[in-house]
């Protein structure tokens, strides 16, 4: 063999050693950060999303498809179906593991029902990123990317109080009802806890009167985040607690439910109460601009998906993963990247959506 060839081969060997040397990061001190660092630049990345319970999930699927491809990866994006979301998602995640993906991004259909799949992913050395919803009670969740969900609840509650003061000045105690999200979604309790950190003191000091008396996350749950469940519960509460009683406001955890609650109230002959929301769904942004729904939360899905793909790229390059803190999932503190949610009312809608070509035009009416 020629000397130059030997030198060239030695060079390749050195590069190989260097690449494999930077291919792994140490497992995080508490429950995360291990696995797939330094994999192929065109690796397969699985994305398992829940049923399309709100527009943010629909948007996320397209953004992941395009964004992963642009970043050079091979994306496999799957949605759970609505009739058997948990089983569908378990099966989809297992298929991704079998197909040899390097990373699986999971927006959990049920944040408590993925234990078997997480064990299989761990055994195959696959990194798991919990997306938007924190998978519970497992030390096999490597990272979490989401908006600050506790703060979502705080902002919703603050806007409820602000709206009550603006629309019904001097009429306190205000009559309100509380809604939370689906009990199989760990976000629901976090949103509610955030909201109650603001509302409980106002209930205790008599500023707010929850006429139905239903104030726990269990009593206020809306299973499957289904609009019809929120509408039915509001109908029932109106019948039982609001005969001859004014309804001033409702804490709604998201837009889909907010519109159902407004439909229930107006259907029963009430004026539109002060209703909160979340997700900046098109119909709700229109409703806010028209002076009906009082507020929503802007969690820019484009930013959340981009942050997740950045994390995948960092893992691919063997770089340190960007995190802003940790989130407790009941088993460990999961290294997390939490983005800031924005409260939107009629007043700041144009400003809040100024950089969003889909939402900004809705504010120009
Ligand atoms: C939550 C998510 C919310 C909302 C809800 C219903 O987990 O954070 O933005 O979309 O699910 O889909």
Image (cartoon, rainbow, N blue to C red):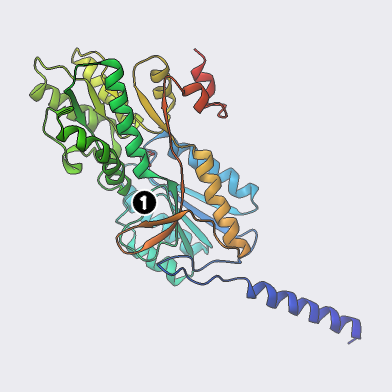
Vertical arrangement, residue 100 with respect to residue 77, above or below: below
Residue found at x 48% / y 57%: 104
Residue at horizontal 40 percent and vertical 67 percent from the top? 31
253 or 209, which lies in front?
209
- The answer to whether mark 1 is within 8 Å of ligand 1 is no
In the figure, residue 311 lies in which quadrant?
Answer: bottom right
Q: Is residue 271 above or below residue 190?
A: above
Instruction: State which quadrant residue 116 falls in.
Output: bottom left
Q: Position of residue 301 (x, y in %)?
A: 49, 39
User: Where on the picture, by quarter, is residue 173?
Assistant: top left
- x and y percent of residue 280 in the render? 43, 29
Between 150 and 15, the residue placed more toward the observer is 150
Location of ligand 1 given as a quarter of the image: top left
Neighbourhood count class around disc 1 (C-alpha, 10 Å): few under 14, some 14–19, many 20 upward:
many
Residue 276 in sight here: no
Quadrant, the N terminus: bottom right
Q: Position of residue 77 (x, y in %)?
A: 50, 48
Note whether 180 is above or below 175 in the view shown. Answer: below
Q: Nearest the camera: 117 or 231?
A: 231
Query: Is residue 35 found left or right of 261 in the rendered image?
Result: right
Is residue 29 visible to us here?
yes
From the viewer's perspective, is 2 left or right of 57?
Answer: right
SS of the residue under disc 1: helix
* Residue 111 located left or right of residue 106: left
Q: Which residue is mark 1?
A: 88
How far across and down, in percent of the image, does residue 287 sit? 38, 19
- Residue at horizontal 42%, vertical 57%? 93
């Amino acid at each position: 063999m020629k000397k130059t060839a030997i030198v060239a081969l030695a060079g390749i060997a050195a590069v190989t050693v260097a690449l494999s040397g930077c291919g792994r990061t140490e497992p995080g001190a508490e429950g995360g950060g291990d696995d797939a660092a330094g994999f192929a630049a065109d690796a397969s990345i699985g994305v398992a999303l829940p049923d399309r319970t709100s527009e943010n999930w629909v948007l996320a699927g397209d953004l992941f498809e395009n964004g992963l491809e642009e970043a050079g990866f091979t994306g496999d994006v799957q949605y759970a179906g609505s009739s058997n979301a948990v089983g569908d998602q378990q099966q989809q995640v297992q298929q991704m593991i079998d197909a040899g993906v390097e990373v699986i991004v999971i927006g959990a259909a049920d944040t408590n029902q993925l234990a078997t799949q997480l064990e299989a992913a761990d055994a195959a050395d696959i990194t798991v990123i919990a997306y938007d919803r924190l998978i519970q009670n497992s030390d096999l969740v490597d990272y979490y990317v989401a908006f600050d969900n506790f703060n979502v609840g705080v902002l919703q509650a603050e806007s409820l109080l602000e709206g009550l003061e603006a629309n019904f000045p001097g009429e306190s105690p205000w009559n309100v009802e509380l809604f939370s999200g689906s009990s199989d979604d760990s976000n629901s309790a976090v949103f509610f806890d955030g909201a109650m950190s603001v509302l409980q003191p106002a209930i205790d000091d008599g500023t707010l009167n929850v006429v139905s008396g239903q104030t726990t996350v269990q009593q206020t749950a809306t299973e499957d985040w289904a609009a019809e469940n929120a509408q039915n519960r509001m109908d029932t509460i109106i019948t039982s607690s609001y005969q001859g009683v004014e309804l001033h406001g409702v804490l709604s955890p998201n837009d889909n439910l907010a519109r159902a609650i407004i439909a229930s109230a107006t259907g029963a002959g009430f004026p539109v109460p002060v209703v909160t929301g979340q997700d900046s769904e098109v119909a709700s942004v229109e409703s806010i601009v028209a002076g009906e729904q009082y507020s929503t939360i802007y969690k820019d899905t484009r930013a959340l998906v981009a942050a997740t793909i950045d994390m995948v790229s960092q893992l691919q390059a063997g770089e340190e993963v960007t995190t802003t803190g940790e989130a407790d999932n009941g088993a460990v503190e999961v290294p997390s990247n939490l983005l800031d949610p924005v409260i939107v009312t009629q007043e700041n809608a144009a400003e809040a959506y100024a950089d969003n070509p889909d939402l900004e035009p809705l504010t120009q009416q």
